[in-house]
Amino acid sequence: MHLLDGIICGMILSLPFGPLAIYCMEKTLSEGRYKGFISSLGMITVDVFYGLIALFGFRYVEGLLRDYQIEIKVVSGILILGLGYKIFRNRKEIKNIVEEDHFGYIRSYVTTILVAFANPLSIFTFIGLFAILGVSTDVKHISLKIALGILIGGGTQWFGITGALSHYRKKITFKTLETLRHYASVIIMLGGVAITLSSFIKN
């Protein structure tokens, strides 16, 4: 049952919304399915880590997260803005993908890990999901099942998303792909700006 709870959490958190999700979709369209999927695994890895913190260590980091909420949002927003700007500035022509760039895989994975790590406020999302699903945050023996479930749920969903985008990619021209990449970079940058500005807006 806890495995299913983890899968549900993983799938909810891996819905293709937000700047990082758009970045992973852009990676799929411009550099191929495997680059996009590896990028998404970076997000999922962080989801697993923050999910485990939500299970065991939330009471230890809650005060820290609340005290530095503004700084966390600013750093996260700036990193996402920089990610979008990097894509926007990279105007090289998209070419047929020969997906054997192993260093590129590592770079894509690490990039999404670093940006996702800058947003530990997602721990609060896990707390809310665990509360809705009735998962106890004090039971240590369920950690492996929850972590595995998050990995399975998020990984399965993004495997399907990148597969669908890869299929779509074969039906459009490189010029269209470049245009989509341009718009994706703008959306990512706007997301970064929105996150940064939201840190200065008091509830």
Image (cartoon, grey):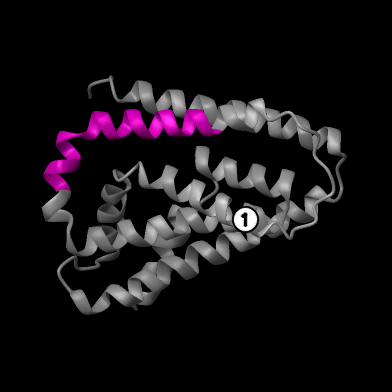
Residue 54, above or below 80:
below
x and y percent of residue 157 in the render?
56, 61
For disc 1, the neighbor class at 10 Å (few under 14, some 14 to 19, many from 20) is few
Label 1 belongs to which residue?
103
Q: Nearer the viewer, residue 168 or 101?
A: 101
Principal secondary structure, stretch drawn in magenta: helix
Q: Is residue 189 magenta?
A: no
Left or right, 30 with reference to 123: right
Left or right, 169 with reference to 147: right
x and y percent of residue 39 in the render?
56, 53
> Is residue 145 in view from this perspective?
yes
Residue 6, above or below 111:
below
Residue 158, above or below 73:
below
x and y percent of residue 153 in the render?
48, 66
Q: Is residue 78 magenta?
A: yes
Name which residue lies at 41% across and 71% down. Answer: 149
Give the magenta-colored segment's residue range.
Answer: 62-83
Name which residue lies at 29% across and 35% down. Answer: 72
Amino acid type assigned to the residue bearing label 1 in the image: Phe
Quick one: quadrant of the N terminus? bottom left
Name which residue lies at 50% across and 46% down. Answer: 111
Instruction: Name which quarter of the figure residue 115 lies in.
Output: top left
Left or right, 112 with reference to 132: right
Name which residue lies at 22% across and 79% down. Answer: 141
> Is residue 17 in view from this perspective?
no
| Mark 1 element type | helix
Quick one: quadrant of the C terminus? top left
Q: Nearer the viewer, residue 170 or 45?
A: 45
